[in-house]
Amino acid sequence: MRIVLVGPPGAGKGTQAAYLAKNLSIPHISTGDLFRANISQGTDLGKQARSFMDAGQLVPDEVTIGMAKDRMAQPDAEGGFLLDGFPRNVGQAEALDATLSGKGVALDAVLDLEVPEDEVVKRIAGRRICRNDSAHVFHVTYNPPKTDGVCDECGGELYQRGDDSEETVRTRLEVYHRETEPIIDHYRAQGLVVTISALGKVTEVTERAMDALKQSQG
Ligand code: AP5
């Protein structure tokens, strides 16, 4: 399957993507994670992305679209993928549509995670991520690690993302409403959008998402 995951910052896209990708046997492709990996490796791409990410703004399309296309062209993504954080504006959605139709394939679904704004602020404020693997995501209250500051999965150090400050989160939410929400209408016009509530336990949301995806294909 070729799926796009959409939702505000902190909705739980990364958390759900890890489970959904495993259940569906497709790679989880997160442009945010790709940028963060480039930043930690000190690449030119990472240097270009950093100031935009720190400010909570979108990294320019010239940089983002090429990086996403390169990742989708890897052999593991040939049979499908779960995109998390891409596309993030209508220009990126149109670029993705053109890339897929050029290959004679298409998206199967756009899974829209709905969460009230006060909940996403709480989720982001308590989020802690493993330095070794960004798929290892915790929350100080909702999903605390067994030992404070230490990843349960691999023992890595847990840290708080630089763009998770209250001020930057406010900017990221504004950018989401202005730039990203319009892609939901773009894909609704193609009959691809499946909206679910992302409230409740992580496992409950995964079940809801799997059911909704199955129904959308039925
Ligand atoms: P990105 O990394 O994509 O961040 P985001 O979209 O803001 O989303 P987050 O990672 O903040 O949240 P999430 O929805 O994945 O939530 P999570 O699962 O971690 O992008 C960062 C930046 O990169 C952007 O601002 C931009 O600058 C740049 N960028 C990336 N892609 C780009 C693009 N395409 N174009 C241009 N720029 C781009 O969960 C959050 C917390 O909640 C965790 O602590 C988790 O444990 C907890 N949680 C999850 N689910 C539940 C639940 N059901 N109940 C309770 N707690 C939960």
Image (spheres, helix red, strand yellow):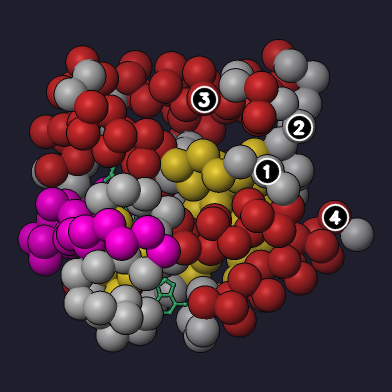
Cα distance in 3D space between marks 1 and 4: 16 Å
The reply to whether the residue tagged 4 has its Cβ within 8 angstroms of ligand 1 is no
Judge: label 1 CB < 8 Å from ligand 1: no
Within 8 Å of ligand 1, the CB of disc 2?
no
Q: Are marks 2 and 4 in contact (CB under 8 Å)?
A: no
Residue at position x 21%, y 31% in the image = 39
Of all residues, the one furthest to the front in this rendering is 155
- For the residue with label 3, is its CB less than 8 Å from the closest atom of ligand 1? no
Mark 3 / mark 2, whichever is N-terminal: 3
Mark 1 → mark 3, Cα distance in angstroms: 13 Å
Q: Label 2: which residue?
A: 79
Measured Cα–Cα span from mark 2 to mark 1: 8 Å
From the image, tell me which residue sits under label 3.
71
Left or right of residue 144: residue 169: left
- Can you give x and y, in whole percent of width and height, for residue 143 in the image? 37, 80
10 Å crowding of disc 2: few (<14), some (14-19), many (20+): few
Which residues fall within the magenta stretch? Answer: 153-179
Whole-number angstrom distance, CA of label 2 to CA of label 4: 16 Å
